Amino acid sequence: MPKTEVQGTKAEVIKMKRGDRMVSATRKKHGRFAKWELVSSHIGRRSFATNHFGKIPTPIIMAATGHKSESAFLKYIGKGRAEMVSMLAEYWYGGDVEQKSKQTNTA
């Protein structure tokens, strides 16, 4: 199976001497890497939050991700105000609100 390389940035841990002791630091390294080298646990955390939003109560997801405010959580998963209004309308009226609106306008 061929390796898939993608353009990206990864963190690289380096050791350097500071005074009389060795310390670790991270530096960003830009280039082409195997896809698996660019994947982190943070991607899983965000995917979990995004995929389960609307299926699991928001406070439970926020507890799992460590968010204290709902506004910070919504920004993290990329849900804007318009999307929230659409979700509320869908919940309230049921079904695909945009599709129903199009059907009403064409009738």
Image: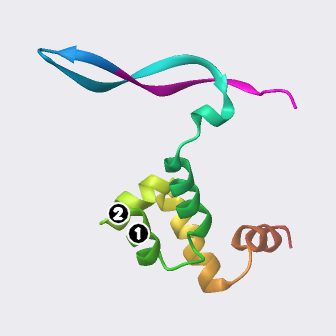
Give the label on residue 103, or none: none
CB contact under 8 Å: marks 1 and 2: yes
Location of residue 67 in the rendering, given as x and y in whole percent from the top left corner: 35, 63
Question: x, y (%) of residue 65?
Answer: 42, 63
Q: As displayed, is residue 56 above or below residue 65? A: below
Q: Which residue is mark 2?
A: 67
Left or right: where 82 falls relative to 33: left
Q: Earlier in the sequence, mark 1 or mark 2?
A: 1
Q: Which residue is mark 1?
A: 62
Which range is magenta? Answer: 1-14
Taking the image as shown, residue 81 lies to the left or right of residue 92, namely left
Which amino acid type corresponds to the residue marked 1 in the rendered image? Met
* Residue drawn at x 77%, y 74% as measured from the top left: 100
The x and y percentages for residue 24 are 29, 26
Q: Main secondary structure of the magenta part?
A: strand
Q: Secondary structure at mark 1?
A: helix
